[in-house]
Amino acid sequence: MPAPDADGLGPEIKDNTDGSICVQYHPNKSGRHEVQMCYEGCAVEGSPFSCMVDNIDGSYVTAFGAGLVGGMSGQMVSFTVTAKQGSLSKLDVKVDGPTKTDITRKDHGDKCDISFLPMTPGIYNIIVKYNGKEMKGSPFVSKVSGEGRKRSQLSLGNSSEYSLKVLETNVVDLVASIKLPSGAIEPCLLKKDSEGHLCVGSFAPKSTGDYAIHISRDEKPIKGSPFHIKVGDKELAHASKVKVSGPTTKAKANEPNILELDCSDAGYGGLSVVIEGPHRSEIECKHYENRKYKISYSPHEPGIYILNLRFADDHLPGSPFLLQVEGEPSGRIRETVTKTMEQAEPVKKNQNCEFYLQIPGTNPFDMEASVTDPDGSTELCEIMDEEDFHYRMMFTPQMEGTHTLSIKHKGLHISGSPFVYSVGQLSSGGTHKVQVGGPGVEKGEVGFSNVFNIYTREAGAGELSVAVEGPSDALIKLEERPHGFLGVSYKVKVAGMYDIHIKFNDAHIPGSPFRVHISPDSGVARNVTVHSLKDRGLQVDKASTFTVSYNGAKGTLNACVRTPSGSHEDCFVQEMDDGLYGLRFIPKENGVHYLDIKLNDHHIPDSPFAIMVGSMAADPAMVLAHGDGLERGSCGIKNKFVVRTAGAGSSFLAVFIEGPSKCALSCREVDEGYEFSYTPFAPGKYLITVKYGNINIAGSPYQSEVTGSGRKPSPLNETTSMVVETVEKRPGAKSLRRFRGDASKVNVRGPGLKKARCNQTQTFTIDVKDAGHAMLCVGMVAPNGLPEPELMVKKNNPTQYTVSYKVVEAGEHTLCIRFGDEEVPGSPFSIAT
């Protein structure tokens, strides 16, 4: 319990035996006190609680509660004042604001509960007097926003990064800890900055002194470790030194409002922007340079909002700001439908199971469904084609446990696949287990039914709501299906950007709200056709070309490729003839790519096109994650889980962890795949998302409950991520040890590198002292193109080698030296005789 003087506060917890508790503490000084309250290691909602204590007439008066800070119009705002028992008659409370408000007061012994109902947004001054004297902190400024508070946020970690000025090719398998000036050791978050240097992420020192950063790979310190950071007062986080300019009290709706924040003199700490109000706001960082930011924000509607600016979790001076948003309303309309989803009946082994989906734009002859049991055995499902692109998948499980259902069209997973199907006991459920997929959450068209599927079987019973918000009202229809399935279709009248909000038990599911661009009636775009497009057998760094024919259509053509790693690459478009265009793109990675082709910003038929680059073997349905770290964890220690990629081919494996703090995340290769270790810094619930080839694996995202003592949870959701390019593994096969080195740091010298004499031995040395660990390869080719027969490498000491060779043919010889997969400086060498 931090306070002006924390000694002797002696917080005591008493059980009231009625499901509530009483917390007592004994203040010994006036001022603001902070009460941090945890239950089973996790901060309770609202913690830490702020209390203002004042000493008046020899007795302490305390005011606390969220109502002293802010609230929402149309909702009751409340707070509590305590004083010496029997003296509450001396207490007087008044509220001044934009409109007159009635105060409700209830006295209970030494406690007085105050509440009032603000009907108009604005600033309300709460005046608390005891025995005619205002208590310390009075008047309290309560900032009331418009009703129906929505929260938009932006978290920027650049200002909390400390560069170690060390180049590292890979940070995936690095493990770091930081020794504080007090001697305590904490886990440390590592990342690479924009220049490729290794840096400490989320560095927010709380005291001056020496900070030692210990970094290791395979339990061995890297070169230069430990790194020392000398922290003085200049490096400490000072929210009061952040300079703010721009609209903090008045802004325009549906227009960019630019804030400039200068953190150059404020030390190290993370910067966050949170806007709360009656509607959502768009927030983005427009520019960043030398710890100076330009932040653009645009509230969707006029009204009263609350603008929170924090640095290292502390409010900037004046924050939170009461923001008056003016301007014209956006005219956005929101339509909502709800449905009570019942708990699905559990199924047993050898019992027939069904999976029912609507998948527009597919051909039943190209559909394929398979189910994989917990032992890894895969069997094809029976598919029944029904009207209007409805498909019924049927299978009979042979064992209990979690099964993975893959549904593919033309050999590629449909939107939402793979799915989880529990046989026997159902999972514990939760909002994060609701799955959504279908073209309707990716794109749409005016006047047509845009369709998607919702799968709630694994989430359990609950209230499901679907809302479509945009420039026009939406006609939403729900198609009830058995076994936890629901079909959704919506039709709108006006083109534009729409938000699809999907909630389960009043909480957004992962990914919600989904942003969907609804295009006008595509009209002439339906005439456009694609020719000679290969969707299989493409190779990395080899161009793929095809043609697009307008067939009488008019307009502007553009094309873009979405890669497995999540980036977007434009296609090269060239006019070949009137109404005929040639398109080309060069894939840079293996996996499934999606090609968007649009005419006048309208998708042409069958766009986006799914294209496989490289092997067909990379399959997210064959990837499984397991380990205690997916369900529970502890603060300050490593929590582990394994992602099994054996038998799934090679692709990009991405892990995202979202929760009340950043995490120190590392990875190491194991026989069956990759083991991830994450160390959270604050208790709470963390969402762990695992993707393979940019597709969620079955069961992802997972929710881990982290307990234990740690830092104060961040008011924002913090995200930590890591991407690993995997190697192909076979089930049951042992992994070869993989080495990583830096060829640029290999030193090669000696007379044998410049000139050679026939039939005479020449020598040179290779020193790999600073280059790390990798395989050293030396080869020499004679003028006739054949390898030189006499070449020998001798190890002098652990890091130095002598190479000797003898040439027998006159002419120019080529000497190649590789360290790992890269040539050393100067290689290949040309040696004349």
Image (tube, grey):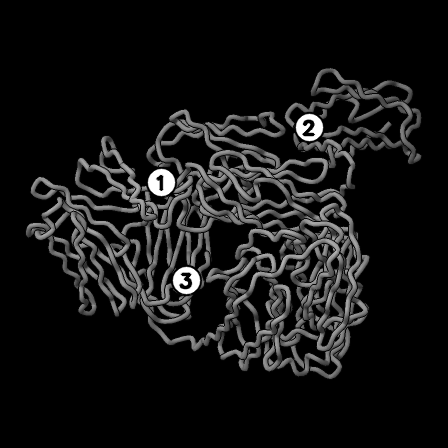
Q: Does label 1 or label 2 sit earlier along the sequence?
A: 1
Q: Earlier in the sequence, mark 2 or mark 3?
A: 3
Residue count near mark 2 (Cα–Cα under 10 Å), binned few <14, some 14–19, many ≥20: some
Give the residue type at disc 3.
Tyr
Label 3 or label 1, whichever comes before in sequence order: 1
Q: Is residue 634 above or below residue 491?
A: above
Residue ID for mark 1? 237
Gap between marks 2 and 3, in whole Å?
A: 48 Å
Q: Nearer the viewer, residue 724 or 235?
A: 724
Instruction: Please state if 61 lies on the left or on the right of 798 as rendered.
Output: left
Which element type, helix, strand or loop, lies under badge 2? loop
Q: Secondary structure at mark 3?
A: strand
Q: Amino acid at mark 2?
A: His
* In the image: residue 19, left or right of residue 25: right
Residue receiving disc 2: 773
Q: Position of residue 226 (x, y in %)?
A: 51, 26
In the picture of the structure, the residue carrying the numbered disc 3 is 297
- Residue occupying the point 49% across, 79% down: 473
The CA span between labels 1 and 2 is: 39 Å
User: Which image quarter: residue 192?
Assistant: top right
**Residue 241 seen:** no
